[in-house]
Amino acid sequence: MQPDAAARRPRLTAAITATRRLVFVALALLADGHAAEAAGQRVRVQGQQLLVDGEPFHIKGVCWNPVPKGGTHPQDLDYRGFVAVDSELMASAGINAVRTYEAINDTEVLDVLWEKGIYVMNTVYSWGGLPEDSAVAKVRAVMHHPAILMWLVGNEWNYNGLYYGLPFEETLAKVSKVVDIIKEVDQGHPVATVHGELPSADTLKALSSVDIWGVNKYSGLTFGDLFDTWSRVSELPMFLGEYGADAYDARAGQPNEAAQAEATSALSAELLSASSAANRGPCIGGAVFELADEWWKDGTGSPGEHDVGGVSPGGGPWPDMTFNEEWWGLVRYDGTPRQAFRAYARSNGGWARRGGDHRGLCYACAELGDVAVLRCGLQR
């Protein structure tokens, strides 16, 4: 028996525990000149390491863009409607961070993630049609919340011109300005940008104020010489902004969960082998793409149907090198885990959870307080 779509969308209640609320209020009261200093002690870059509370941190992340069936991005994005169940799924796999594509400004959503040990890589500027200073309100709204890990600017903007079709040089200038604006407002969190493949030396020089670089890369079962090449061109830390494989095999015209799981395991192991948290390389981790299927992404189909359209640019995800856009979830839309979910749960055990809590959670079950729910559709 499998849960229906509604099972993944319980509404978040307004009830917030007194302890968590007092913590947030206390942090918010630091909104004077001491705020940046206090936050800076929590999250900072040192060499090629990301330090949280003074300890090296390896991101075992996932891309999170919860859009309900029949909806489209970004207008139907629903963090509040999905966070309760999705955060349990994440925690049960040992995920310690989410990467967003639009800002989370709802502190109650952040409270739920924080309670589950999940940080947020919060994208505060993605669409080039907005003024650069539009990022300011998004940063100020949640900059004192303990769940914030870093700010992100753009997603593979070198391909899409900030989803506005801007020429490269104009896009570069806009990204640079947004980064500088954010750093004027908040000195307590690193600012990152996410590039499609490795940036050039000229791009790195033009964006010298960026603290951390994200790289989206899809190249089968290996990242190749990505980490060695990065170490030759930059002394900054980097992470995989997106990686993984979809669950549909265009060669056979049917799902192939085993291949998706194989890629998830192999690529996550490579990330760990280059982890700066263990002084093995320049990589602070990555965000596998993605938590759950998004049914709106095939432009030739319907947002209410699970379509199989895809593109084959000549390179890409294992095994078919085809991007089947609506099949990337570690779980299906209804929350049913795929083999890749279980594979990811078994990966990166060393730095998986916050505060040194490395409990051996069952990969299909969340053992959080009084909650024990199997997302395969059973409860115990």
Image: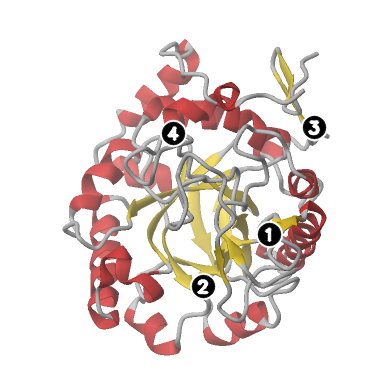
Secondary structure of residue under mark 3? loop
Of marks 1 and 4, which one's residue comes earlier in the chain?
Answer: 4
Residue 75 horizontal/vertical position (percent): 31, 41
How far apart, in angstroms, are the residues tagged by discs 2 and 3? 33 Å
Which amino acid type corresponds to the residue marked 4 in the rendered image? Tyr
Residue 95 sits in quarter:
top right
Q: In the rendered image, is residue 242 in sight?
A: yes
Measure the alpha-carbon separation of dots 3 and 1.
Answer: 22 Å
What residue would you read off at disc 3? 361
Q: Which residue type does callout 2 highlight?
A: Leu
Q: Residue 264 location in percent, x, y?
A: 74, 58
Q: Earlier in the sequence, mark 2 or mark 3?
A: 2
Is residue 56 something that shows in the picture? Answer: no
- N-terminal of the pair, mark 2 or mark 4, is 4
Residue hosting label 4: 79
> 289 above or below 199?
above
User: Would residue 292 appear left or right of 221 to someone viewing this image?
Assistant: left
Instruction: State the SS at label 1.
Output: helix
The kind of residue tagged 3 is Leu
Residue that numbered label 2 is attached to: 236
Q: What amino acid is at disc 1? A: Ala
Crowd tier of the residue under label 3, counting other residues whose Cα lies within 10 Å: few below 14, some 14–19, many 20 or above: some
